[in-house]
Amino acid sequence: MSQYLYLILDLGSLSIPLLYSIFEKDFHFIKYLKPIVFSILLVAAPFLIWDAAFTLMGVWGFNATYHLPIKFIGMPVEEWLFFICIPYACLFTHEVLQFYLPKLQLERTFTLLLGVLLLLIIAVLLVFSIGKWYTSVNFVFFILLLSYGLRKELELLRRYFISFAVILLPFFLINGILTGSFIEEPVVWYNNNENLGVRLFTIPVEDVFYAFNMLFSVQLLFNYFKNQRNGNSQKISA
């Protein structure tokens, strides 16, 4: 049974958001299927390359006790599914919050201050972690992405920071299990020589920024494709 743990976490994360997307008639998120698929796959591609490279380098790896024996490029099939199931669930979370709570957002000034503070903290940490692969690549990506968000997508960040705080609740549960909480050994192990060695419970602190990098990238692309779709629909109806 333990062999199915990673698969159960993947499918469990996807199941409720997917069912709600299909059968809830007012929200009916599934109507944006093409933008959803395009945004998730476009982000999954580089992240899977990153994942495969770090797996080959021994930056992290997978415990065969908790996943199926099917592997591609050294990664279990569940790891591939992770980059579909988790982004879908988190994209759904942001969109459903916006649908039912459209006024839920941070003050503009507070968003700017929070963003700049995060950039300063991560920049300092980056200076002291050069040579640690996971920390360095992750933090460089985060600095570039958040800088873009503050400059070009501030209105989205005002809402997305709140959504990401909500997303962190299931994140700590699922990623906690993956990194060894509540079970005898981690599903995914990390080489602490390649990260800061700071854990939030059993989760490397870098994972929070990795999650933001992946999920905010998906959100940016989804917004672009959704706006293109809505724009084309308006032109046709006109």
Image: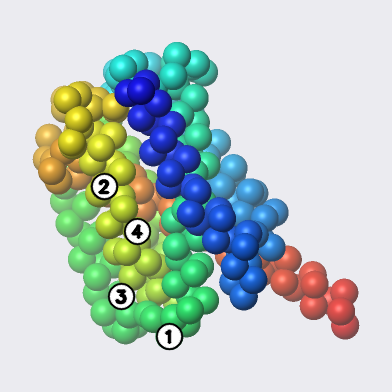
Q: Is residue 38 left or right of residue 200?
A: right
Disc 1 target residue: 103
Q: Secondary structure at mark 4?
A: helix
* Cα–Cα span, label 2 and label 3: 26 Å
Mark positioned earlier in the residue sequence (2 or 1): 1
In the image, is residue 212 above or below residue 51? below
The crowding category of the residue bearing disc 1, from other C-alpha atoms within 10 Å (few below 14, some 14 to 19, many at least 20), is: few
* Cα–Cα span, label 1 and label 4: 18 Å
Q: Is residue 211 left or right of residue 25?
A: left
Q: Secondary structure at mark 1?
A: loop
Kind of residue indicated by mark 3: Thr
* Cα–Cα span, label 2 and label 1: 28 Å
Q: Secondary structure at mark 3?
A: helix
Mark positioned earlier in the residue sequence (4 or 2): 4
The crowding category of the residue bearing disc 4, from other C-alpha atoms within 10 Å (few below 14, some 14 to 19, many at least 20), is: some
- The quadrant of the rendering that contains the N terminus is top left
Residue 111: which disc? 3
Disc 2 target residue: 173
Residue 171 position, x and y percent, is 31, 50
The residue at the point 55 percent across, 53 percent down is 18
Residue 132 position, x and y percent, is 22, 31
